[in-house]
Image (spheres, grey):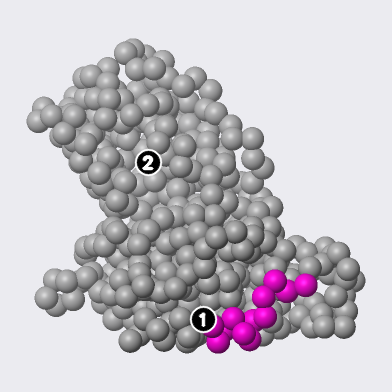
Amino acid sequence: MPSVLWFRRDLRLADLPALLAAADEDGDVLACYVLDPRLEASAGARRLQYLYDALRDLRDGLDGRLLVTRGDPRTRIPEVVRSVGAASVHVSEDFTPFGMRRDEQVRDALGDGVEWVATGSPYLVSPGRVTKSDGTPYKVFTPFFDAWRRHGWRSPAESGRDSARWIDPADVSGVASVGDIPDAGETLDLPAGEQAARTQWREFVEDGLAGYADDRNRPDLAATSRMSAHLKFGAIHPRTLAVDLGRGKGGQAYLRELAFRDFYASAVTHWPRSTWWNFNTAFDAIELDDGPDAQAAFEAWKAGRTGYPIVDAGMRQLRESGFVHNRVRMIVASFLVKDLHLPWQWGARWFLDQLVDGDMANNQHGWQWAAGSGTDAAPYFRVFNPTTQGKKFDPSGVYVKRWVPELADVADVHNLDADRPKDYPQPIVDHGQEREEALRRYNAIRG
């Protein structure tokens, strides 16, 4: 009998276990994607653009044999199943709070007559697989990392376009197709989809992997892989990356970043409340700023008009490109929560609105790390000095000058005391004073 392969965060054909499982049913396979209005409404425009571009790439990879429909999956997936008389629905398992609720509801809507088959996940090691000896989840990364490496993962799945006999959506009746896949009207700084992901990864392995450990914290260098958006949407699986890493210094540093991705996914799976609330509930009592002055400071931060060059460069890169270097993400996050004393949730929400690679687990727990309230968080007393960080990681000011053109002719962008252009703002706060204030507030909740 036919089966349905429902694509979600796995917009690819290579290394896709769910495809092999669907093809193993010994029947034809209908590939489908459901544009959920709830997700379209909550996603930033750039993430939608990546999604739409990746869907077009996937459809091309299937020679047009991808059914794209819009609506509530609780009604659309049963409609798709009925339209082809499918006996099963195959998916890659989703571990986000929203995705888990949605899948449970769709399974209930399908009833007992249709088999629900979840095979694989977006992670090297799926959440729940790596636990302590007593079965409880890890709250600290280092022991998680050790256990994660011992657990290991499978080799890439040998799947592709020819793995299944695909049903042509033109032959399917009873399901409303969207016709043309929409466009969000955004221009991405890197192409989207499986083919772009695989090309980008090959280039990084050849040219960037060896130096990754030494250069990955330098925003002035093209030293990172830029694979985060591809991983977010599943245009490539981390297994495909891991198999190329080897045992060198650069490869092992990259593997550690993939482990952090799995660690944060595990945290959100076990503690879904931590997506928007402090993981460490002691931080619920911390004093935060609010009101018109706080909002004005937040708007200056969003616009890249704080008067701190490395912070402003990062925020302008985010606003203009939908990406910001990871080291700079930490710097701007620290500035928001520890210099401006604003809720980390404000920054997390803005990032999700702007980022192409906005991922709920990575984004929220990255922000909680900066705020000191999350799993394995930065110590409360660690307050990034934006000037020192700029000097260390952008020593020649190349990164700052790229994104803050007012400083293009300044000799030392990290020392503007005597050379601050008139069209560039004065610092909106004094870092030394705000550091002391942040420590006062942190000490107050320590008790």
Q: Quadrant of the N terminus?
A: top left
Q: Which residue is drawn at 43% across and 82% down?
A: 442
Residue at label 1? 438
Residue at label 2? 8
Q: Cα distance, mark 2 to mark 1?
A: 41 Å
| Residue 389 is inside the magenta segment | no
Find residue 376 and report its image quarter.
bottom left
Q: Which residue is drawn at 44% across and 55% down?
A: 359
| Secondary structure mainly formed by the magenta segment | helix
Residue 55 in picture, x, y percent from top left: 49, 36
Residue 156 in picture, x, y percent from top left: 36, 56
Closer to the camera: disc 2 or disc 1?
1
Residue 231 in picture, x, y percent from top left: 46, 55
In the image, 259 versus 284, the foreground residue is 284
Q: Is residue 146 left or right of residue 248?
A: left
Find residue 261 and report its image quarter.
bottom left
Res. 268 mark: none
Question: Which amino acid lies under the numbered mark 1 shown in the image of this protein?
Answer: Ala
Question: Which amino acid lies under the numbered mark 2 shown in the image of this protein?
Answer: Arg
Residue 331 in picture, x, y percent from top left: 59, 74
Callout 1: helix, strand or loop?
A: helix
* Residue 359 seen by the camera: yes
In this picture, which residue range is highlighted in magenta? 426-438
Q: How crowded is mark 1: few (under 14 residues within 10 Å), some or many (20 or more)?
A: many
| Residue 436 is inside the magenta segment | yes
Q: Which residue is drawn at 34% across and 17% down?
A: 175
